[in-house]
Image (cartoon, coloured by chain):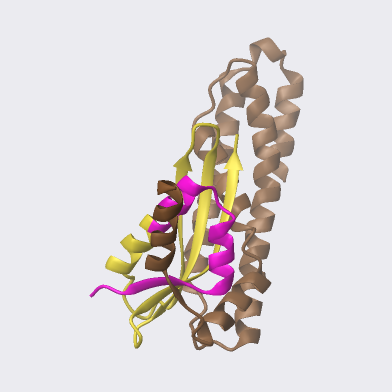
Chain colours: A yellow, B brown
Amino acid sequence: MSFAPGFAPDGQADWRALETELQEQVLDAMDRIAANPPPPPATVFLGDFVWEASDAKHYVWIRYIVNRTAQTITVIGITDYARR
Amino acid sequence: MIAVSLLDAVTRADQPQAVPARTVELAGQLIDASLAERRRIRQLEAEFAPAESSDAQAVMDIERSIHSLYSGWVAEGEQILLRVRRLISSGLEVRQAAEMEDAYASTLSRLKFTPEKTSRGMEQARRGEFTPAEDLRNELRARIRS
């Protein structure tokens, strides 16, 4: 079952602070999670990925909340550390 | 950290250009142990992840505890990496050094998730504050096109 991905205000603010290409990577990661959400009882969980830009390696963490009633997956925060 | 001290001691005893294999092996063992410890923390984090219905105090307590475990790991990891980088800059190969660098950088990113940040985000989600990702995807596409 697919869920609708979206952002809480803090998650959205974190997303806006990322560079454009990384914003796209985050949306893609959210789509993947929404298409294949973790099974119950997980409700609050973390996902991470590494993205290599031309000038840095980015280590990204995304915190999600699953609402199985509303069938939504909400990003409540994103962190990024760039290693150059 | 006893093992790091041991690595310091054996490295000091050796000529920089003639570090024996056992010193490099010790560095590799330190990395193995450190990466295993980080896997254990991640496992604990997944196991004790807060539920949406968890009360704010319980969320903060668990988050503080996990954050503190990662903090401790980073402090020790940094000490290991300082020494491993020195060995590598002398031309030596230390196994899993790249994995350790990745784990260290990833954990620095993870540490930006403070307990307060998580708690605030959960509260926003609980209040139903939600912007569909599709809206931001459309905005991003429009921005790229313009």
Query: Image point 68% across, 47% down: which residue?
Result: B76
Q: Is residue A62 magenta?
A: no
Q: Nearer the viewer, residue A30 or B37?
A: A30
Q: Is residue A69 left or right of residue B95?
A: left
Query: Image point 54% across, 27% down: which residue?
Result: B94
Query: Image point 71% across, 26% down: which residue?
Result: B10
Q: Nearer the viewer, residue B33 or B143?
A: B143
Q: Is residue A10 magenta?
A: yes
Residue A10 higher or lower than B84, as above or below = below
Residue B141 higher or lower than A8, as above or below = above
Q: Quadrant of residue A66?
A: bottom left
Q: Position of residue B108 (x, y in %)?
A: 63, 50
Q: In the rendered structure, which segment of residues is drawn in magenta?
A: A1-27
Q: Nearer the viewer, residue B9 or A72?
A: A72
Residue B113 higher or lower than B49, as above or below = above
Q: Position of residue B78 (x, y in %)?
A: 68, 42
